[in-house]
Amino acid sequence: MRAGVVVFPGINRERDMAIALERSFGRKPRIVWHKETDLAGLDLVVIPGGFSYGDYLRCGAMAAQSPVMRAIADHAARGGHVLGVCNGFQILTEAGLLPGALLRNAGLRFLARDCCLRVERDDTDFARLYRRGQSFRAVIAHGDGNYFADPATLDRLEGEGLVAFRYATPDGAVTPEANPNGSARNIAGIYAPNLRVLGLMPHPEDLVDPLMGGEDGKPLFDSLAAVLAA
């Protein structure tokens, strides 16, 4: 059971992600430089948050062309697990591993604050230790987190059960007021069709220890650890 954390120039959340993974997996993850192409032995590949290549051109667009992304695409095609958080979500959409795009926040301001996420399904490898409909606290820190897709794609995501999390109130209501960045249909995270690739904007790794203010994000990593250890 091995995890790898991919580092691009400008990524700055790899240490936080590594700590979260080690707490749940019981071992340090492998740090993967973006020019590497050998992911042999890894069960889970994580693309953490930050500002890859300074967010020049479009967030994630330059990182999506790095050599490691072909290896990640092959890993995903073989059924391997992939998690992209914040800038990682942006990179996954730019690389075509997930549909849609992340646009500028509706208010055109960088947001760094808590939010609440509603769990849309609890039968995936990422969410087995949550409950469907549960609302949990998460942290956002992004300027381009406004999820966008054309209506047909949004309908397909809904129809195939590929929406992972939505921005919601603490009691689980999906309202315009609970949407911090203008994302279509309050979408905060989505799955690939095989449910083994997840991209989400909020940072679950920020809440894995009481000393960090809570453990709301820990069930995501514990869910993966339990599945991959089976």
Image (cartoon, rainbow, N blue to C red):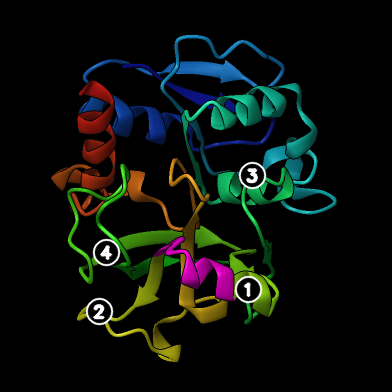
SS state under label 4: strand
The type of residue carrying mark 4 is: Arg
Q: In the rendered view of the protein, which quadrant contains the N terminus?
A: top left
* Residue pointed to by mark 1: 105
* Residue pointed to by mark 4: 137
Observer-side mark, 1 or 2, equals 2
- Judging depth in this view, the residue of 170 and 151 nearest the camera is 151
Work out how far the residue at label 3 is from the one at label 4, CA to CA, in angstroms. 27 Å
Name the spot of residue 196 as percent of width and height, x first: 44, 40
Name the spot of residue 79 as percent of width and height, x first: 48, 30
The type of residue carrying mark 3 is: Leu
Work out how far the residue at label 1 is from the one at label 2, CA to CA, in angstroms. 22 Å
Outermost residue toward the bottom in this view: 176
Residue range in magenta is: 155-164
- Dot 3 alpha-carbon crowd within 10 angstroms: few under 14, some 14 to 19, many 20 or more: many
- Dot 4 alpha-carbon crowd within 10 angstroms: few under 14, some 14 to 19, many 20 or more: many
Observer-side mark, 1 or 3, equals 3
Q: Which mark is residue 97?
A: 3
First along the sequence among labels 3 and 4:
3
Work out how far the residue at label 4 is from the one at label 2, CA to CA, in angstroms. 11 Å
Measuring 51% from the left and 50% from the top, which residue is drawn there? 193
